[in-house]
Amino acid sequence: MKAEGHKISMLTAYDYTMASMLDDAGVDTILVGDSMAMVVQGHDTTLPVTLDEMIYHAEMVGRAVSRALTIVDLPFPTNHLGVHKTIEMAGRVLKETRCQAVKLEGGADQAEVIQALVSAGIPVMAHVGLRPQSIHTMGGYKVQRDEDLLLEDAKAAESAGAFGLLLECIPADFAQKVTNHLKIPTIGIGAGPHCDGQVLVVNDLLGLPCDYVPRFVKQYADLSTVIRNAASEYCSDVKNGTFPGDEHSFK
Ligand code: KIV
């Protein structure tokens, strides 16, 4: 798609119902993101989600998707446990779900791991710029402005065999330089319009409840209001006896 100049769309999904709808809607790539820790499990970082939990959700997503490429995040600290352990864990993702690739946070520091996974037949997307799994060393969810580090990470990930690169929270002109420099596609989130593709967390796109909406999010719907209104109408109907009606009852 990059070679042909077609932009790539990616959204996260964490269960069968959502993944089926996104696949039907024509989304190119579905990510079972470790953002699940925050938007599904209610944690305040992505750190607590486990490999077993990722696999449980990836299995639901994998079962729903017949068209899109499905990618699963390796949760913290999987890819820091050594090459063999990482192959074992990423191998479980491909064996136990129908998903086809993994994503890991890191660039130059993860080159050896990326190379080993790819040699083992496991396609890898690398994730550079803001890395939420390193939130405590990065000191917060901030725009990353070290252009040299970013370029070094991007080149290292490509040379190691990554098939794509996710760029999170970096200035748009850095993302443009990286995108022009690489043969593999870049997918941006908070990285401006020049990436080869874009990703959003599906809950943000749909306007589902969250504590904070980052500047890079565009909300395409307000499902939070729709769901609250539907639930409150249902409660009133039950309390005043207008649900169930005859049409919902058996004779
Ligand atoms: O886990 C996730 O949802 C991500 C986002 C950056 C898309 O990695």
Image (cartoon, rainbow, N blue to C red):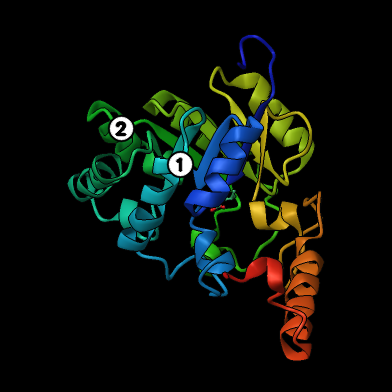
Amino acid of disc 2: Ile
Q: Which residue is mark 1?
A: 64
Q: Eyeballing the image, is 240 above or below 12? A: below
Instruction: Identify the residue shown where x is 45% and y is 26%.
Output: 163
Q: Is residue 199 left or right of residue 98?
A: right
Q: Which mark is residue 200?
A: none
Could you say which quadrant of the image residue 214 lies in? Answer: bottom right
Instruction: Identify the residue shown where x is 76% and y is 74%.
Output: 228
Q: Residues within 10 Å of mark 1 (few under 14, many from 20)?
A: many
Q: Is label 2 or label 1 in front?
A: 1
Instruction: Identify the residue shown where x is 62% and y is 71%.
Output: 249
Could you say which quadrant of the image residue 90 lies in? Answer: top left
Q: Which residue is mark 2?
A: 122
Quadrant of the snapshot with the N terminus: top right
Image x and y of residue 234, in percent: 73, 77
Q: Is residue 25 left or right of residue 219?
A: left
22 vs 46, nearest the viewer: 22
Could you say which quadrant of the image residue 195 lies in? Answer: top right
**Total marks placed:** 2
Image x and y of residue 63, in percent: 39, 42
Image x and y of residue 232, in percent: 77, 80
Say which label, 2 or 1, has the lower sequence index. Answer: 1
Residue ranking furthest to the top: 4
Q: Eyeballing the image, is 198 above or below 228? A: above
Residue ranking furthest to the bottom: 239
Instruction: Identify the residue shown where x is 81% and y is 60%.
Output: 222
Quadrant of the snapshot with the C terminus: bottom right
SS at badge 1? helix
Q: Is residue 111 left or right of residue 7?
A: left
Q: Is residue 210 visible?
A: no
193 vs 154, nearest the viewer: 193
